[in-house]
Amino acid sequence: MSLATYYFLTITAVYILMSWGLYLPYRVAHLHFLTVANMLISGYLSGYMVQTLEVPFAVALLAGFAAGGIIGYIVSLFIGDAPTFTVVIVGFTFIYISRTAVENIKAVGATMGMFGLPAVSGSPVMHRWTILILLYVLVVVVGFLIYRFEHSRLGRAASAVFVDKDLATSMGVDIKRLGRLLQTFSSLVAGGCGVIYGFIYRSFHLDFFTFHLVGIFMTVIFVGGYATMWGTVLAAPALYGLSLILPPAVASWRIVIYGTILIAVLVLKPEGFITRRLAYKLETALSRRRRR
Amino acid sequence: MQKEIRMKKKVLFFLLILLIAVSVVMVGCKKEKAPKVVVEEWEIPFLNSLTGVIASIGEYLQWGAERAAFEINEAGGIAGKPVKVIGVDTALEPQKGVVEMSKIVDWALVALGPVPEPVIMAAAPIAVENEMMTMTATTSLEYAEQFFPWSISWFPATKDRLPPLARVWAEDYGVKEVVQFVGTYGPWPGMAAAHVEGLKAAGATHLGDIEFGQDVVTFGPLVVKALDMKPDGIIIAGWPDKAAKIVQELKSRGWTDMEKILLFSSADDAALYTTGGADLNGTIIYNYINVDQDTPRWNAFKEAYQKDHNGLQPPSLSTNYYDAVYMIKRAIEETGVTGDPKKLKEERKLIAEAMLNMKNFEGLLFNWDMSDGVPTNKPGYLFQIQDGRKKLVKEIRG
């Protein structure tokens, strides 16, 4: 596999996972940008563990997941049922706080960043295969869990909360508990992603985790479709790939192109390319074929 | 008669010996035939940020590299073949930088960039793994050395090059107590620490640092905090527009000794002058190129730059990739690199080795030597700003 393909596939997988990390809380109308801070915190934590404490990568990865989950859970105790705007503010604030904290911690390279993270398994080639397999196993596992969630009572409850919180409460949905569950799960996934993201580059720099990432994940969700998990799977490779294949003369108009696509989608197909109806139709068609 | 014949024979024999001797010497001295260059054109990719928040910097870095290519082509090219600099936009995104670098390592002999630090950190390891020289000519040694011997530094170690500049400023302007504004980005806190070393050497006191991030919009409270420490000198190490705003805040709060404000090199960009305007008059700024130099080569560069940029002076970093392209030219010509794709690996190594210890490199503004990837004898300059222009105050070497 060429190096370019490897980077395309790995970063696409990170985009899918992180966009799902935003998508899930959005099922209850929460824009949970805390996930970007989770990426940063878990990433730097794992980098420190592997490089300075010489802890095996697998342990550092688990620690990254755990750190994301714990932070997500603690924060969700306060904002599990908060209005959308509050969740947004908390997320942005955490990005600022975590960036500033890292800027001042010399042990993790402060503003300079962390260089030369070791390969996770022997040679550079093995490192790449390990990261790639790990990421796509994660995509399958997280995708499966989200799929099961969507088709469960919890998923239907989330849809009810998205439409009308009061109505959902009157039907017996525990809004806070549901919000906590989704936020914690998202933060957990983001924590793991942060670790792998740094090990793709084998370095960490604060500018790997900017608000720009929020913009990318939001675009992926809203262009792909915010009402199903499948929109992300379509939009992440398409949007990332687009930025790579644009000819140089057009590339400088990239942001305009993205903006136009986003506006066009919001106006013409507000639910995004993959709507719930389309996903339902496809699922029905596929299950019919399977039965035959 | 026989004597005459014998004499002639002797002369002929002597001439024959002489001819053979001359031939042997000639053959021995004959320059080894240079390997044949197989490329029709030398293509040098430049991983640059041509769009995004530092697009204006990326533009003049690209301009410098292309200017060098233009001049080289006018003069006959590299080893007789024209050279082309191919701008590859990373848009300041590591995600894009790694994919672009992955494509480049498949074919390029050497690359310019990446720019700036986040993209360097993500993409330069790919060049290292593929043993290709990648010339990170805008970052500090502390970043570049992570990728040695497949990168070179454009600057000596921060701890060596900055203390003398701060020391001379403090001594010449009688600065005794200094507060420093420090932007929290990449190598800047390290540069600020090096300023403090210079201040100590001058016998000045460092009263403290005031850190600020890229998101800071208003500097009133930070400037009040600084003035509260009662400094008689200020050093500003931060983004150009923000450095200008700090100067304006200081002035608006009664600061008059403008030469007791020292701006660091990374602030020396168009945004400093457009934001600061006349408020910057009298302040001191240090940098590594002397725009007032009067040499035909520099004058031609300056004139061309001003023609393409509405009369603006070339910024300090505009010469870096210009020199980098000339360094590539010299490395190719000295090592006899052919550009043959079959010899890609060995020719990459030849180029890297030639650059790491290149001696007496004729840069646009001065000559310098490389020693294991680090420049050894580059000067620094103190300037005074007046009406948007820099006037040389002093040249400082080590």
Image (spheres, coloured by chain):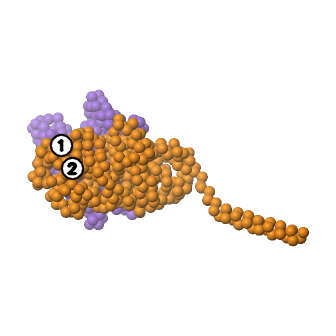
Chain colours: A purple, B orange
Q: Residue A246: x, y in percent? A: 40, 38
Q: Residue B16: x, y in percent? A: 77, 66
Please say if A133 is above or below B314. below
- Type of residue at label 2? Glu
Kindly identify the residue that appears in the image at 23 percent across and 56 percent down.
B172
Q: Residue A203: x, y in percent? A: 32, 56
**Direction from residue B3 to residue B283 in the image, left or right:** left
Return the residue at label 2.
Answer: B259
Kindly identify the residue that appears in the image at 26 percent across and 54 percent down.
B188
In three-dimensional space, the C-alpha distance between marks 1 and 2, rounded to whole angstroms, equals 14 Å
Q: Nearer the viewer, residue B117 or A186?
A: B117
Callout 1: SS: helix
Q: Which mark is residue B142?
A: none
- The part of the image, by quadrant, that contains residue B198 is bottom left
Q: Nearer the viewer, residue A279 or A125?
A: A125
Quadrant where the N terminus of chain B sits is bottom right
Q: Residue furthest top?
A: A268
Q: Residue B310: x, y in percent? A: 35, 35
How many numbered marks does the figure carry? 2
- The part of the image, by quadrant, that contains residue A50 is bottom left
Return the residue at label 1.
Answer: B248
- The part of the image, by quadrant, that contains residue B312 is top left
Q: Residue furthest right?
A: B1
Callout 2: SS: helix
Q: Are marks 1 and 2 in contact (CB under 8 Å)?
A: no
The answer to whether any part of residue B91 appears in the image is no
Quadrant where the C terminus of chain B sits is bottom left
Q: Are marks 1 and 2 on the same chain?
A: yes
Marked residue chain, label 2: B
Please say if B80 is above or below B277. below
Kindly identify the residue that appears in the image at 11 percent across and 54 percent down.
B230
